[in-house]
Image: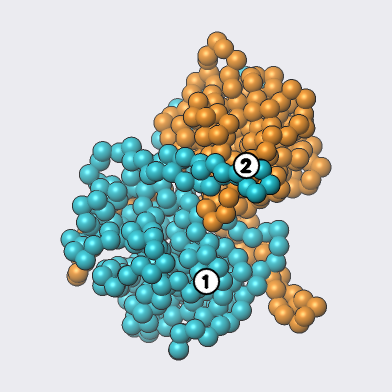
Chain colours: A cyan, B orange
């Protein structure tokens, strides 16, 4: 670990006023110098979206005493890009933490999650990065029981570093009796959608996205298994999306062109 | 290959009126029954975003004769979800194709791209899926020289299927002399951002995202290498983001909690 106090970038997707980021700030303030760049409004489900068709705002705000904070008009990934390039002016922080998300981001949710995409962007920028999420979707979720785990994982990452081009996806069950930490793989799952079809006052149809998480993975080494058994799950994530095992198969195709 | 005419879902991220989707429709109409569900406005850079905070519109439109078309108010991923659940009512199409994107989606761009995220969502739904992109960012890009490759890749996928939980990311160089198709892995790269800082008429600062693609991969088996050498690149993509190789390393950490 560096002997100087580490600099920690804190982001999220629930917005700069969310309880989850406040909880994360409480922990990170005990570890290092904290800088927050977070969306000015909720950005759940934004995935790895970036803002290219319109300009971005980045304004310094005073919310929690002694913490340098900026609110951003863009997505969680925009926040990381602006942090690295405008706030840190290319001087990388020692750690990037995202969350704590109000709701789980295990399994396939890693793709949809703004929280996790911000952490992925941190890793692309070469910063050791971690996304944290709690299985509680309420605005007034209580994060106190997972804070000691948040701190321990952050300290381990600062002390040990992470393998090149990886980051961590950390999820917590909503229980006061977390049994410990399990290193896991992403469970295979999907959302079985059921759109809620309604009619507006002008007689036009509209749809609300809804659905159920459908686990298609009986493995006991998955994040979904760990959470269901009251463990905190830690999944190492990469942003190389190549299905390397499929290359040999495709190399045998004869393209008639 | 099925003997019946295949049903093909066509999506994109440049919007239902883009030249690229028109080009894709021309090809797909020669292969099967085509159904289009595409965004009503450009959605470039939307990544795997979904719409959860507001309702969605899905309206049937008449643009190209003989083709069933719907415009959607949401993201490219929303389009796929609505297509599968509302338009196809759970009866999966035989193929999902996305694009042809106005601009490359090779390498790290797979994460930011709405085009590729729509194809990823198709694969999550269990549909053989392909994203197509051309190295031409102009609204009036000419796609004619890549159409025979588009058709050949689609026919091969229909004939052979794809390994479970994979899809294809297909990119074309902007040349009339495409040398052939190369099966590749995703090149390691990032965007080196340079935000363009400006001042609005009210004296407030705003930022435009800009930047340069920075290739950090000297391999000759990458999509970036293939494109630079005038080959069409085909990368098999997975949506398991676990860095499996990192699990052993993390399993040796001693968590003091």
Evaluate whether residue A222 shows in this view.
yes
- Splitting the image into 4 quarters, where does residue B19 fall? top right
Labelled disc at residue A205: 2
Counting residues from the start of the chain, the first of labels 2 and 1 encountered is 1
SS of the residue under disc 2: strand
Q: Residue at x 43, y 29 (%)?
A: B163
User: Which residue shows up at 45% across the image and 71% down it?
Assistant: A18
Which is nearer the eye, B88 or B32?
B88
- Chain bearing mark 2: A
Q: Residue B108: which disc?
A: none
**Position of residue B51 in the picture relative to residue B102 (left or right):** left
Image side of residue A5 versus residue B226, left or right: left
> Considering depth in this image, is A66 or B186 the residue closer to the camera?
A66
Label 1 sits on a secondary structure element that is strand
> Which of the pair A141/B19 is nearer the observer?
A141
The residue wearing badge 1 is A38
């Amino acid at each position: 670990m560096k002997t100087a106090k580490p600099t920690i970038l804190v982001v999220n997707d629930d917005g700069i006023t969310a309880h989850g980021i406040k909880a994360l700030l409480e922990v990170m303030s005990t570890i290092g110098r904290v800088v927050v760049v977070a969306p000015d409004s909720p950005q759940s489900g934004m995935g790895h979206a970036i803002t290219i068709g319109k300009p971005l705002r980045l304004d310094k705000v005073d919310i929690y005493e002694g913490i340098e904070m900026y609110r951003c008009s863009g997505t969680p990934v925009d926040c990381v890009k602006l942090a690295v390039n405008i706030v840190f002016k290319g001087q990388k922080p020692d750690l990037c933490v995202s969350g704590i998300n109000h709701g789980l981001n295990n399994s396939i949710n890693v793709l949809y999650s703004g929280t996790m995409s911000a952490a992925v962007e941190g890793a692309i920028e070469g910063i050791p990065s971690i996304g944290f999420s709690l299985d509680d979707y309420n605005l007034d979720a209580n994060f106190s029981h997972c804070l000691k785990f948040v701190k321990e994982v952050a300290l381990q990452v600062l002390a040990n570093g992470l393998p090149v081009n990886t980051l961590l996806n950390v999820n917590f069950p909503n229980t006061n009796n977390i049994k410990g930490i399990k290193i896991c793989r992403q469970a295979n799952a999907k959302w079985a959608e059921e759109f809620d079809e309604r009619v507006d006052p002008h007689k036009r149809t509209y749809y609300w996205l809804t659905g159920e998480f459908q686990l298609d993975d009986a493995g006991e080494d998955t994040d979904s298994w760990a959470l269901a058994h009251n463990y905190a799950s830690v999944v190492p994530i990469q942003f190389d999306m190549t299905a390397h095992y499929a290359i040999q198969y495709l190399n045998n195709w004869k393209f008639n062109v």
